[in-house]
Amino acid sequence: MKTNLFHLKGLKYFLILWSTQGLSALGSAMTGFALVIWSYQQQGSALTTAGLAIASYAPYVLLSIFAGSLVDRWDKKKTMVLCDLFAALTTVAVLVLLKTDRLEIWHLYTVNALNGLMNTIQQPVGEVAVTLLTPPEQVQRVMGLRSLSNSLTTMLSPVLATAVLTLLGLEAVIAFDLLTCAAAVGSLLLVIHIPEGESAEEKTGLLRSAREGVAWLGRNRGVLDMILFLAAINLIASVYNAALAPMVLSRPGGGETALGVLQTCTGLANLAGSVLVTLLPAPKSRVRVICDSLLFSMSTENLLLALGRRTGVWCFGAILGWIFIPIMNANLSALLRLHIPVELQGRVYAARNTLQFFTIPVGYLLGGWLVDSVCEPYMAGLSGDTFLVRLLGAGKGSGAALLFLFIAAAGVLVCLVFRRDRRLWALEETTE
């Protein structure tokens, strides 16, 4: 038979790009996981560790809105190669500092800021490249495959990073990262052909490009409201990320192994959801899937992280919280691609990145500060017979558990508010 289970016709170059970039992402995630553990061991501070993510996202958010003009006019393949090579150089710098016993926290902040600056270009150009390599009838399947690779990265990176870190050290983790980056660059240079899409005849400046991206969103309020919805979710999710490692590493039932197991369960849940979205047909209502998936996630995982005292409970929460996220992401990406003209995607995605992701560094900063300066001191000052101590436990990590209780309520409230937004539901009327 000429057909197969996945009907992958027309996806040759996408599949090569997807697999090699996914492998490179795995290497980068392993290095990131290992460096989070290293930084927390050095300082023991949630805010210091959260600073790694803040340094990555701040330049990305501040400058993304101006990147659209460059993305729309530059050669996509050459741009991706240069971005990957720059990331490799910063990783080499970390390795040299580590080998000479000079690596400090501020070095990692600097490297992350430089990589965040490069991601300002790399992320939107990657989105456009995927659009150019994807036939319209394959959009749902491609989004599922991308969710699958993200899930595998989430699942495997903590396990592999912990194993390599324990057996061979941080240097070996970084060396693997460099090897996977080399594979991604080699495939782009030697194998992959990315066609150039239609572009506006007039080459606009950075400021005008930014205005065009924002103006398009202003004329398409359903897409804008969806982006604002995700911005609110990202704020809560980044508070979650800032508090997760300090809580699990500090709790009596936690530690490095528990954190790795928890992250692996998150990856397994993502993997299961990715397989489902790859195999299932497009839903009748993408907006409903997005809203319901996020509501279920926010109402389950954060609550179990707050109340749980053992790794098993945390892992069960992670499975409930993440199993529908790949389905949500696939439908969100498909919805955006079906509404945003390909010749404007660079500019619109750049504007989207600023609006949707500016809350991430804010959330990391807020989460780290709340854990170190508010929640942990508050819980430490309570007597052992108070309701919150009986509910959440005592000792270091109980303050982070208190924070998870608050963000569970905040996440549900955000989902319920945006679920009533009529502009979101109006997107269904103009889809396909």
Image (cartoon, grey):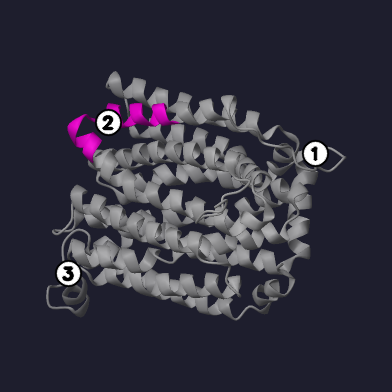
- The furthest residue to the right: 201
In depth, the one of 216 and 135 nearer the eye is 135
The residues colored magenta run: 163-180
What residue sits 34% from the left and 45% below the top?
Answer: 48
| Element type at mark 1 | loop
| Marker disc for residue 393 | 3
| Callout 1–callout 3 Cβ contact below 8 Å | no
122 displayed left or right of 264: right
Q: How many marks?
A: 3
| Marker disc for residue 205 | 1
Q: Earlier in the sequence, mark 1 or mark 2?
A: 2
Q: Identify the image quadrant of residue 375.
A: bottom left
Q: Residue 162 placed where, x, y %?
A: 24, 41
Disc 2: which residue:
170
- Badge 3 crowding class, 10 Å Cα cut-off, few under 14, some 14 to 19, many 20 or more, is many
Alpha carbon separation for disc pair 1 and 2? 43 Å
Hey, what amino acid is under mark 2? Answer: Leu
Q: Residue 402 placed where, x, y %?
A: 29, 68
Which dot, 3 or 2, sits closer to the camera? 2
397 displayed left or right of 210: left
Hey, what amino acid is under mark 1? Answer: Gly
Alpha carbon separation for disc pair 1 and 3? 56 Å
Location of the C terminus by quadrant is bottom right
Q: Identify the image quadrant of residue 422.
A: bottom right
Which dot, 1 or 3, sits closer to the camera? 1
| Element type at mark 3 | loop
- Badge 1 crowding class, 10 Å Cα cut-off, few under 14, some 14 to 19, many 20 or more, is few
